[in-house]
Image (cartoon, rainbow, N blue to C red):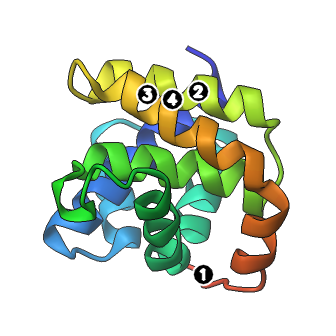
Amino acid sequence: MKPRTEARGLALQVLYEYDLSGHPAGEVLMNRLQENPEDEGMVAFAREIINGVIPLSEKLDGLIAENAPEWPLDQISSIDKNIIRIALWEFAVSKITPIKVAINEAVELAKVYGSDSSPRFVNGVLGSLSTEVAKISNLLANDNTIIKE
């Protein structure tokens, strides 16, 4: 598996635990790394994702809700929400990943971590959001918080 793909998976696991338990993201990341040490470059990318997504979660969720109107936000699984948050952050906020790549990576994460319907759902929501990148970028600009180790 590619290091960036592994980093997304690690970030997803941290964000999922953070959402469900409220444990500090830095501690969750460190615990994951103690269980399974990883390459520092991969960890740095995972940390960048986590640091980017957490402070924007509410705004990202608002965008998800707008683009999945048939699914109330509280009925969307935490895994699916976090996969969409990661991809959205990558292509609309940090702009470090091309849109098509971010969506493809998100669909692959959904296949591994989500339910049977997750890949199609994630692809549909991100496809809808991908047409509004400039609007999303403006909405989400300048919200940053750093997660300490």
Give the alpha-carbon distance from disc 2 to disc 4, as whole Å. 10 Å
Taking the spot 24% from the left edge, 60% from the top edge, the residue there is: 72
| SS type, badge 2 | helix
Please say if 145 is above or below 90: below
Residue 41 is situated, as x and y percent measured from the top left of the image, at: 70, 42
According to the image, label 2 marks what residue? 105
Residue 82 is situated, as x and y percent measured from the top left of the image, at: 40, 52
* Label 1 environment density (alpha carbons within 10 Å; few <14, some 14–19, many ≥20): few
According to the image, label 1 marks what residue? 146
Residue situated in front as seen by the camera: 70 or 38: 70
| SS type, badge 4 | helix
Residue 142 is situated, as x and y percent measured from the top left of the image, at: 77, 85
Residue situated in front as seen by the camera: 24 or 104: 104
Please say if 143 is above or below 15: below
Q: Are marks 4 and 3 in contact (CB under 8 Å)?
A: no
First reached walking from the N terminus: tag 1 or tag 4: 4
Give the alpha-carbon distance from disc 3 to disc 1, as whole Å. 24 Å
Please say if 75 is above or below 127: below
**Furthest-top residue in view?**
1
First reached walking from the N terminus: tag 2 or tag 4: 2
Q: Which mark is residue 109?
A: 3
Give the alpha-carbon distance from disc 2 to disc 3, as whole Å. 6 Å
What type is the residue that disc 3 sits on?
Answer: Leu
What type is the residue that disc 4 sits on?
Answer: Asn
Q: Are marks 1 and 4 in contact (CB under 8 Å)?
A: no
First reached walking from the N terminus: tag 4 or tag 3: 3
First reached walking from the N terminus: tag 1 or tag 2: 2
Q: Do the residues labelled 2 and 3 touch (CB within 8 Å)?
A: yes
Give the alpha-carbon distance from disc 1 to disc 4, as whole Å. 29 Å
First reached walking from the N terminus: tag 3 or tag 1: 3
According to the image, label 4 marks what residue? 123
